[in-house]
Image (cartoon, helix red, strand yellow):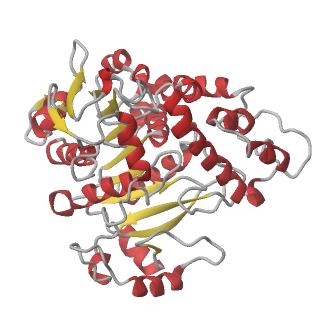
Amino acid sequence: MVFLFNPAHWGYNGTITQHIGQEGTVKLQKKDGTEEQLHELISKEVPNLADGAKFQLHPMLFTGILQTMYLAAGDFSKKFNVFYGRELFELSDSGIASVDWVRNDWKKDYDFDPATGSYNKQKLAEDGAKTHPEGWPRLHPRTRYMTEDEKKGLLDDTSKPLIIVMHGLAGGSHEPIIRSLTEQLSTISDEKFQVAVLNTRGCCRTKVVSHKLFYAFATEDLRELVQREHKRDPNRKIYAVGFSFGATMLANYIGEEGDTCLLSGATLLCNPWDLVLSANKMKTDFWARKLFAKNITHFLVRTLEVNMNQVEWKGGEKPTNVSPENPTNYPFTRENLKKAKQFTEPSQFDETFTSKAVGFDSAWDYYKVGSSLNRLPSINVPTLVINSHDDPVIGEENIPVEQAKANPNILLVESDLGGHLAYLDRNYNPWITKQIAMYFDTLESFVK
């Protein structure tokens, strides 16, 4: 019980701490012609994220472990009733990712009742049957593929700024935490934003059609989506938010882009900045190992298994010059898959598959180079970083306080409570998703 009730990390009355360097944060050019530092603007307009601000979570979920467990296993089926229209996004390397666009207009089309969460499931199923690609998995509730006319109408409308959401390692648009965020983002300030979730290849019932899966360096899919949307309307602002491993990929992307990044702002929630520390925690921490490591590993192995026909190495000489920019499917064999079914830690999967696919000798070499901490100094857009001190997956030692303070483009907000992505309040709603929505609303409302 000492692990579960560590007196330094329990309770439900939380406190926010901002980590600001001596020079403060970046000065933002405001629409009224004045300047204001990032942390000053956010502290004023999003007071719940101000230094020293207090918040309250569910009294029964009084540790980060309980918060995280409930988010993973609780019943959220009647909450966050977002409707998505799916687009299959064809990529330059012949791969496919799926983009789920929030369709608030479908609530009327399908007779959605906000009091009960009910809607016309039969009509949605009938419409979905007309657009569903043959041989593809069925989609999650309130989600269907768009018709070509629906897709064209949505994509041609660039009147609203766009927010792209990146999910975590075992997730997608269907996750409660993602639906909570997309609901908040798509309804704030009279539906100010257009919102889309980029589902990673193989995730959220997206088939893998090429030899490539996903990894920390997999920034190309996001880059191509951002470039497409920017080309559609260069004057429209584009923002992005990443959760957990999605935050790693987003941080790597904006760090790689540096001064040329097309985003106007970003948020990174519960990012495992140092993948070596994160992997070590999964191996050595009792609760991380018992409650989370095996489930994450099972997801990775299952994703590979269901897509084995597409990614399997068919034989031949081992390719040369393998790198993150030139990955290979050489390790994706039936023999390795059979071994993988006995794995209990993500590092075992990455040792056998991921590291070899991107040209590293070991998982630990891959983690060292792939960690987004390496690209944190190059982030050059206003970026809200949120990490929880009691995160049982990431760990407090993985919060990059000094590195963040050295980059004025980053506002690091550390909470003492919240768990991993959870922050569940008395009504089992993620308190943090509203704050993230208010952050983007503030950037769009005040910043040039």
* Visible residue check, residue 326: no
- Where's residue 251, x and y in %? 44, 35
**Residue drawn where x is 82% and y is 34% of the image:** 320
Image quarter of the N terminus: top left
* 301 relative position to 185: left or right: right
Tell me the residue at 32%/80% (across/down): 119
Residue at the image position 26 percent from the left and 63 percent from the top: 159
| Residue 239 percent across, percent down from the top left | 33, 47
Q: Give the residue displayed 78% in from the left and 33% down from the top.
A: 321
Left/right placement of residue 15 relative to residue 220 reads: left
Q: Looking at the rendering, in which quadrant would you find the C terminus? A: top left
Q: Quadrant for residue 106, please give it.
A: bottom left
Q: Quadrant of residue 134?
A: bottom right
Foreground residue, 180 or 440?
180
* Residue 442 picture location, percent across and down: 17, 44
Q: Residue furthest front?
A: 1
| Farthest residue, direction right | 316
Q: Nearer the viewer, residue 28 or 436?
A: 436
Measured from the top left, where is residue 308 in percent x and y?
A: 75, 56
The single residue placed furthest to the top in the displayed view is 22
**For residue 314, side relative to residue 173 (left or right):** right
Q: Is residue 256 visible?
A: yes
Q: Is residue 122 above or below residue 387?
A: below
Comparing 164 with 52, the one in front is 52
